[in-house]
Amino acid sequence: MNDKRIVIVTGGRLGDWALPLIEPDDFLIGADAGALFLARRGLRPDIALGDFDSVTAEELALVRRVSAETREYDPVDKDYTDTELAWRLAVAKRPKEIVLVGGLGTRFDHTLANVHLLRFAAREGVPACLADEHNRIRLVSRSLRIADEGFPYISLLPLTESVTGITLTGFRYPLADAAIEIGQSIGISNKLTGGEGMIAIKEGLLLAIESRD
């Protein structure tokens, strides 16, 4: 499946803003209420999964009816959140990219856990991001090219204790072989100077967060 994207729609904060993030050829995984979101908007999940504790019996019947495949889990026996179950399944399929929609929401514990999933994908060599109408979050393990796609702010935050050898080109505030430690805000609210920029690092893991108000 490395010629296709996988889009995971999970049951965090969702709205019609999410629909343009889905392309016609995407492989769709709906996690719990995310599957219901897809079903109600006329989109057919290739796989719907979760414990479905966020939907009613009638809503689950709709998910089962419209999905190509439904995988149901016991909420007590499963070790992972519904989102992580979907993420692990997506990584195993080795797509060209994973996009998680609905993973940024009002539950900060779930949001942070979902951001940490980027590390799992990076370890397996699968490009991935979390996206909503205000943010796109990716992980830099060596280098990342960022194009100007309507996000005026680009923030860099370490996911490891420190990130070293950071070099930025094409940014208003460039860096050359710099280091950032976790807890420092020096990487907040940078900007591109042109159509694209490049982030390169030597050691560590760096979150690249593109955002708009």
Image: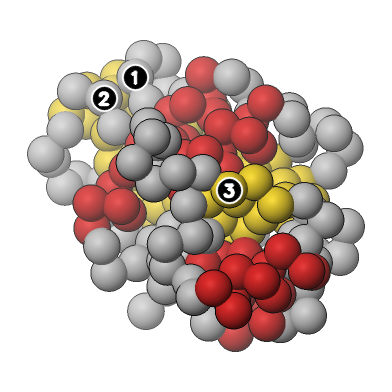
Assess disc 1: are there few (<14), some (14-19) or many (≥20) residues with their C-alpha within 10 Å of its C-alpha. many
Name the residue tied to disc 1: 204
Give the answer, above or below, for where 208 lies relative to 181: below
Q: Residue at x 21, y 30 (%)?
A: 180
* Element marked by disc 3: strand
Identified by mark 3, the residue type is Glu
- The residue at which mark 3 appears reads as 72
Residue 161 x %, y %: 19, 23
Which residue is located at x 45 percent, y 44 percent? 74
Which dot, 3 or 1, sits closer to the camera? 3
Disc 2 crowd, CA 10 A, few/some/many (<14, 14-19, 20+):
some
User: Furthest-front residue in view?
Assistant: 57
Q: Are marks 2 and 3 in contact (CB under 8 Å)?
A: no
Q: Seen in the image, is 109 located left or right of residue 197?
A: left
28 with respect to 33 (left or right): right
Give the quarter of the image for residue 157: top left
Task: From the image, tell me which residue sits under label 2.
Answer: 160
